[in-house]
Image: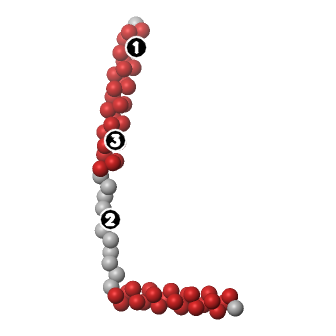
Amino acid sequence: MQTNTILAVIDQEIARLTEARRLLEGSSKGTKVATKRRTLSAEARRRIAEAQRKRWAAQKKAAK
């Protein structure tokens, strides 16, 4: 192969890779998938709070 031919092939490969990188960067920036947040009922929040208070009380009692 001639040097010019080799350089032309390398330039084509660089252009192809540059385009692939541009496409990948563009797709990762603007396509954040929104996750649906689940809401807890007031009763569920109350039960969780009570359980946490019990854990805190047990820790406090064990520290004495």
Left or right: residue 63 versus residue 28 is: right
Disc 2 is placed on an element classified as: loop
Circle on res. 24: 3
Circle on res. 41: none
Disc 3 is placed on an element classified as: helix
Residue drawn at point x = 29 percent, y = 52 percent: 31
Find residue 50 and report its horizontal and vertical position in percent. Answer: 47, 91
Residue drawn at point x = 31 percent, y = 39 percent: 23
The residue identified by callout 1 is 6
Find residue 22 and report its horizontal and vertical position in percent. Answer: 33, 37
Left or right: residue 8 versus residue 49 is: left
Quadrant showing the C terminus = bottom right
Find residue 7 and report its horizontal and vertical position in percent. Answer: 39, 14
Q: Amino acid at mark 3?
A: Leu
* Label whose residue precedes the other's in the sequence (1 or 2): 1
For disc 2, the neighbor class at 10 Å (few under 14, some 14 to 19, many from 20) is few
Foreground disc of the pair 1, 3: 3
Residue drawn at point x = 35 percent, y = 15 percent: 8
Q: CA distance from mark 1 to mark 3?
A: 27 Å
Q: Amino acid at mark 1?
A: Ile
The residue identified by callout 2 is 35
Disc 1 is placed on an element classified as: helix
For disc 3, the neighbor class at 10 Å (few under 14, some 14 to 19, many from 20) is few
Residue drawn at point x = 32 percent, y = 55 percent: 32
Find residue 46 and report its horizontal and vertical position in percent. Answer: 40, 89
* Label whose residue precedes the other's in the sequence (3 or 2): 3
Residue placed most toward the observer, 10 or 57: 57
